[in-house]
Amino acid sequence: MPETKMLEKLTSQLAIKNEMVREALAEALATFFLMLFGLGSVAQVVLGREKFGTFLCINLGFGFGAMMGVHAGGGISGAHMNAAVTFANCVIGNLSWRKFPAYIIGQFLGSFIASASVFLMYYDALQDYTGGNLTVTGPTATAGIFATYPAPYMSLWRGFMQEFIATAVLVAGILAINDKKNAAALPGTQAFIIGLLVTLIGISMGMNTGYAINPSRDLPPRIFTAVAGWGLEVFKAGNYWWWVPVVAPTLGGIVGVFVYNILIDFHNRPSLETGGGDEKAKKNLETVVATELQNSV
């Protein structure tokens, strides 16, 4: 039919051939889902004065948002949705450094657009809750809807350690979920189990710092709030906390990869078990980290 041929021609013309661009777009959509559901759940709890949800709802929002992100972009880019995961992939040689900017741009774009979307959807509620005065701290503070801030009792370096450990646990957990030589998740359930992992981290490690565990989750919304009415105080609050959710997860992600492989995977390789020889084992060890992380995202 002419209509079908026209549609096929239009689809062919609109289809992006560049692999890097397709991966960037996949990261943008995946991160958008993660952040829209995550930040939306925070907005509903805060602005609804906990009449429409509790902290558990926030954990579930980010958890199932991560699940939807994996479904949206996992088959194209791996659905990192996390600059720390992307950085770890590049460090171990699993992802080309030339793709690093594309992944980060995609993640940051999706996160920023999701922040703007939540702001627009809850604009009237924000005005009602704050009386039109958007603040970072105080009884009607709302900047925490978008970016993370430490609890008043937390020091900068204890908060750094919290984010470092939580991100290491996240990455090690993702490796375990996808490790087919171990007790991996059943085929087709990985996205759901990863969502549960994110929820579990929030339930057990979310109180002190808000469990950013992801530079792409924290920095773009913080930039958005800076230009949307909260001002530069979003970078000064918490003793200039803003850099912690960027640096600590980045370092923690790398440690999580190596901890899992050193404690589990290096000792559970087929070539080592079947006595394939020292040289074969050496080559296997050189590629194990890259292979394992690729299977995880």
Image (tube, helix red, strand yellow):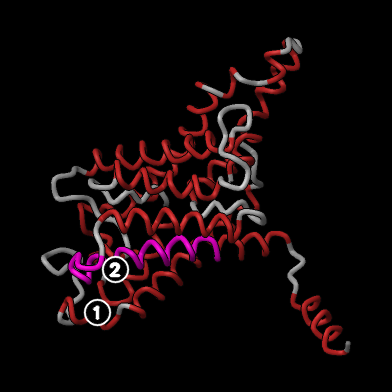
Does 56 appear above or below 227? above
Q: Amino acid at mark 1?
A: Ala
Where does residue 257 sit, x and y in percent of width and height? 51, 33
Q: Nearer the viewer, residue 155 or 183?
A: 183
The residue that mark 2 highlights is 43
Residue at the outermost right position: 1
Left or right, 53 with reference to 78: left
Identify the magenta region. Answer: 29-52
The crowd level at tag 1 (other Cα within 10 Å; few <14, some 14-19, many 20+) is: some
Residue 6 in the image: above or below residue 261: below
- The quadrant of the picture occupied by the N terminus is bottom right
Outermost residue, bottom direction?
2
Q: Are marks 1 and 2 in contact (CB under 8 Å)?
A: yes
> For residue 48, which quarter of the picture?
bottom left
State the image coordinates of residue 50 (x, y, percent, origin top left). 20, 64
Q: Which residue is mark 1?
A: 125
Query: Quick one: SS at disc 1?
Result: helix
Q: Is residue 51 magenta?
A: yes
